[in-house]
Amino acid sequence: MKKTTKSIYLIPYGIYPIDNGLKRESWKILSVLNLLGQCTIFSACNKPVGGGWTDQAKKELDRHNIHVLFREQVQKRRNLLQFAGTLYAALSKVLKLEKAFGHSNPYHRFAFPGDIWENLTKKFELAVISYSYWARFSSACPKIVVLHDLLSDYMWEGSDRETRDLKTADLVIVISKAEERTLQERGITKTHWSPPAVNESMPP
């Protein structure tokens, strides 16, 4: 099959080594994108969001012809919203305000500027975003959001903001049929169930 589709995949953490279920699910999506054509990962190499990006991880991705682009390479300085989000997140953590996290987790929600993402996507034919934190980002090409979990149960706004964000996606991929039904009840009908990357048979 001829590789034609250039894609960019927003993911916050180093995807290799595949040492947990979340990374395995992300690698499954990445493998599909790599089959379609040239794939670039967009991530952060510094905390509080970026993590796990080792030289070994980058070499392994290079071996698979997958390019990695870091936020720090395209954004030299954090903007005011990013600083405010980090400060609010730190304060919420100190005060143990757990409801400030979830889908609206300010550490994650403001980690990547939406204008930079939109500008990057002008160079690609498909934009893929992990998690609903960044589902609101506009893309210059078709946008897919991959849900590992519905996070609205943990956010103080309830499901309203998450639903608004996800409705902007051209497709929402879920690994849970129950979550797919929940999304469809909220009016999000452009969904696709991607079965979890586990063995088909139960262990003995």
Image: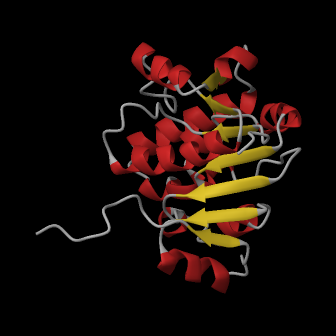
118 and 202: which is toward the camera: 202
Question: Which quarter of the picture shows residue 146?
Answer: bottom right
Residue at the front extreme, as displayed: 1
Q: How is the image coloured?
A: secondary structure
Can the viewer see residue 75 in this picture? no
Residue shown at the point (52%, 54%) measured from the top left = 100
* Quadrant (top left/top right/bottom left/bottom right) for the C terminus: bottom left
Residue at the left extreme, as displayed: 204
* Quadrant (top left/top right/bottom left/bottom right) for the N terminus: top right
Position of residue 188 relative to residue 56, above or below, is below
Residue shown at the point (50%, 78%) measured from the top left = 177
Position of residue 110 relative to residue 69, above or below, is below
Residue 57 location (% of width, % of height): 44, 23
Residue shown at the point (79%, 62%) measured from the top left = 170
Residue shown at the point (55%, 39%) measured from the top left = 107
Residue at the bottom extreme, as displayed: 185
Question: Which quarter of the picture shows residue 180?
Answer: bottom right
Residue 43 location (% of width, % of height): 60, 30
162 and 71: which is toward the camera: 71
Can the viewer see residue 149 in this picture? yes
